[in-house]
Amino acid sequence: MIRTVLGDIQPSELGTTMIHEHFIIDLSKVRHDGGDAHLENIEDVEPEIRYMMDLGVNSAIEVSTNDLSRDALKLRQISLD
């Protein structure tokens, strides 16, 4: 069983998978450079996910940690089934 933001699935349901992605992230705590280190806008992320899916990707594993502002609710919003 694999736990996703949309619910549990069987491993056979994953299909082609991107295994190390950062969709919603805030690197400012890590970089300390004052630069553009935020990706928090769902509207900016969705086209990239659609492009990934158009290339045949079925699943992605979001690996951002809590201290990088992982946001499970936003990840659920951008998850396309």
Image (cartoon, rainbow, N blue to C red):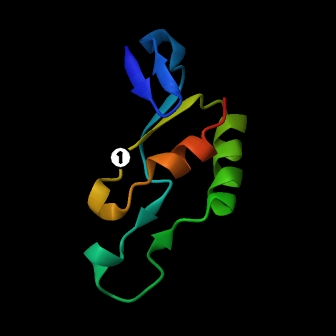
The amino acid sitting under disc 1 is: Val
Describe residue 34's horizontal placement relative to residue 76 as left or right: left
Structural crowding at the residue carrying mark 1, measured as other residues with C-alpha within 10 Å and reported as few (<14), some (14–19) or many (≥20): some
Q: Which corner quadrant holds the N terminus?
A: top left
Question: Residue 52's spot in the image, x, y percent?
Answer: 64, 42
Q: Which residue is drawn at 61% across and 45% down?
A: 77
Q: Residue farthest to the front?
A: 73
* 36 lies above or below 51: below
Secondary structure under badge 1?
A: loop
Question: Residue 18's spot in the image, x, y percent?
Answer: 48, 37
Q: Which corner quadrant holds the C terminus?
A: top right
Q: Residue at x 37, y 62 (%)?
A: 69
Describe residue 42's horizontal placement relative to residue 4 as left or right: right
Describe residue 1's horizontal placement relative to residue 49 as left or right: left
Describe residue 27's horizontal placement relative to residue 78 as left or right: left
Question: Residue 30's spot in the image, x, y percent?
Answer: 27, 73
Q: Residue at x 43, y 13 (%)?
A: 11
Q: Which residue is drawn at 70% across and 45% down?
A: 51
* 19 lies above or below 35: above
Q: How many marks?
A: 1
The residue closer to the viewer here, 81 or 7, is 7
Q: Residue farthest to the bottom?
A: 34
Quickly name the residue at label 1. Answer: 63
* 18 lies above or below 43: above
Question: Residue 64's spot in the image, x, y percent?
Answer: 35, 52
